[in-house]
Image (cartoon, helix red, strand yellow):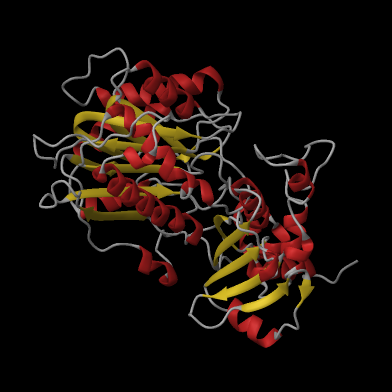
């Protein structure tokens, strides 16, 4: 029998070893290392308001705002992208229905609660989601429409029902707290956080070529730190601009920008039930005679896009990429921000499959956390990537127009190279060159892995120079991910408490 007091010592030791270093402090203070990502000011789009309020959605939260509202002063063109998880949360189903049913796609904004995902909650959950939207609509004078003009989002624990009476009771206060200042926007960004350690809010200005004297603004907030993996947008996100955009072009612009931003991040390989990114454009800053930004039908070439459209999609892509990167930087328990860049001579799909597999690999991510240059794990992750390694459960995925010979050579070990690219501008560290391992300087590798930011470059097309033919084309895929620490297990082991 263990000596008296041993159990108590063990409990104390367990508590000490599980002390959180990278998760959100109980008092919601922002860790010193993350404060640099929180803006102290911003330039916000005209005609949009934001606010927050306390409802007490989660029993353990007794004082922090957990409702957020972002609205346009006049209903405006709106688009959204949603999770492809089969168990879609009630707010996802309802918001999709609202968008499909309201043919003019003119919405006022979105109401959000944190603390409860309202996912896998049956018909009652859908009633609650619609009640949130309708109660918010009732705060405005033009609330008589059959289809609500407010989208709804929820985030938090799956499988629990909303305390809907607390939420509806707080919505009038939420409406009265709306404003246009930086503090209003920041408070709204804070209110949608769950395990996030800092609010994620970005704003910036831009101009368009046809009327460069007009300054437009775009702002966005997002939340997410765990259950992050691409299959639409992987989190909650709200993006607003005062530029004028054609209604039918909104969804296409959002899809294009999401492809290499919100759909190129991964923290733990889990695609949430609640993922939603909503995009609003009210045109409040546009001169009356300016044509709206528009995209021709899909069969048209992008070369036919106007200069304004090309400029705006560049702004939106860069903006959404920066917003998505903040999610990765706040990965649960993460200590590193990792860019994975994969190049392939076969197809874009091959490069993306390899990049996603590396980003999801727990062995790669734990090695990075341990500052261990175990590059063999990177190769392993590429080799078993779904669609690259054929299996009875999932046959090899072949890109269109790929020849049978190419199909057998989607990955050639003898043409594969791997390097660490230091973010301080110093020379790359080659780990594998054309299938042959390099003599790695372990102290140099550890030096690189000590840095907060790291890039892994994988070349699947590293042929000797004299073997490259004139049709040689390189496809590149980029994923943003983080390491996997003890802290991730601690956070998710007691998430419901």
Res 86 → quadrant: top right
Left or right placement of residue 39 versus residue 486 in this view: left
- Asked whether residue 67 appears in the rendered view, the answer is no
User: Which of the two residues, 471 or 407, is positioned nearer the viewer here?
Assistant: 471
Q: How many marks?
A: 0
Left or right placement of residue 297 versus residue 339 in this view: left
Give coordinates of residue 130: x percent, y percent: 39, 21
Give coordinates of residue 397: x percent, y percent: 72, 39
Left or right placement of residue 474 versus residue 466 in this view: left
- Asked whether residue 482 appears in the rendered view, the answer is yes
Q: Residue drawn 45% across and 28% down?
A: 91
User: Which of the two residues, 431 or 54, is positioned nearer the viewer here?
Assistant: 431
Q: Residue drawn 39% across and 53% down?
A: 323
Return the residue found at the far front: 470
User: Which of the two residues, 85 or 402, is positioned nearer the viewer here?
Assistant: 402
Q: Is residue 234 above or below residue 365?
A: above
Q: In which quadrant of the rendered image does the N terminus lie? A: bottom right
């Amino acid at each position: 029998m263990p000596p008296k007091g041993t159990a108590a010592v063990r409990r104390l030791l367990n508590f000490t070893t599980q002390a959180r270093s990278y998760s959100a402090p109980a008092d919601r203070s922002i860790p010193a290392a993350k404060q640099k990502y929180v803006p102290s000011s911003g330039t916000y789009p005209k005609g949009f308001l934001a606010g927050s309020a306390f409802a007490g959605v989660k029993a353990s939260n007794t004082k922090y705002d957990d409702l957020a509202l972002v609205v346009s002063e006049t209903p405006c063109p709106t688009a959204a992208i949603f999770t492809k998880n089969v168990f879609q949360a009630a707010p996802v189903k309802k918001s999709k229905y609202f968008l499909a049913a309201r043919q003019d796609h003119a919405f006022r904004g979105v109401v959000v609660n944190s603390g409860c995902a309202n996912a896998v909650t049956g018909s009652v959950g859908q009633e609650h989601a619609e009640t949130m939207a309708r109660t918010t609509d009732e705060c405005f004078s033009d609330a008589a429409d059959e289809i609500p003009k407010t989208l709804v989002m929820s985030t938090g624990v799956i499988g629990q029902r909303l305390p809907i009476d607390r939420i509806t009771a707080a919505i009038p206060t939420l409406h009265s707290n709306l404003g246009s200042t930086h503090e209003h926007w920041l408070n709204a960004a804070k209110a949608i956080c769950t395990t996030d350690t800092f609010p994620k809010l970005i704003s910036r200005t831009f101009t368009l070529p046809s009327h460069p004297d007009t300054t437009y603004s775009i702002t966005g907030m997002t939340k997410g730190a765990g259950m992050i993996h691409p299959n639409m947008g992987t989190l909650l996100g709200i993006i607003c601009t005062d530029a004028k955009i054609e209604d039918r072009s909104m969804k296409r612009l959002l899809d294009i920008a999401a492809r290499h931003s919100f759909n190129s991040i991964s923290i733990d390989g889990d695609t949430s039930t609640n993922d939603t990114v909503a995009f609003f454009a009210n045109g409040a800053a546009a001169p009356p005679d300016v044509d709206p930004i528009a995209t021709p039908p899909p069969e048209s070439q992008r070369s036919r896009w106007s200069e304004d459209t090309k400029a705006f999609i560049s702004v939106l892509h860069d903006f959404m990429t920066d917003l998505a990167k903040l999610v990765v930087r706040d990965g649960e328990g993460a200590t590193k921000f990792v860019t994975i860049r994969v190049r392939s001579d076969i197809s874009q799909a091959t490069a993306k499959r390899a990049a996603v597999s590396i980003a999801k690999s727990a062995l790669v991510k734990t090695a990075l956390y341990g500052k261990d240059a175990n590059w063999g794990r990177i190769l392993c992750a590429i080799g078993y990537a779904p669609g690259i390694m054929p299996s009875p459960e999932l046959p090899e995925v072949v890109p269109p127009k790929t020849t049978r010979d190419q199909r057998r050579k989607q990955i050639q070990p003898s043409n594969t190279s791997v390097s660490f690219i230091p973010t301080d501008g110093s020379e790359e560290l080659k780990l594998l060159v054309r299938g042959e391992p390099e003599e790695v300087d372990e102290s140099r590798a550890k030096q690189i892995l000590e840095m907060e930011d790291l890039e892994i470059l994988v070349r699947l097309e590293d042929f000797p120079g004299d073997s490259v033919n004139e049709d040689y084309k390189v496809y590149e895929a980029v994923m943003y991910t983080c390491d996997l620490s003890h802290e991730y297990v601690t956070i998710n082991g007691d998430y419901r408490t």
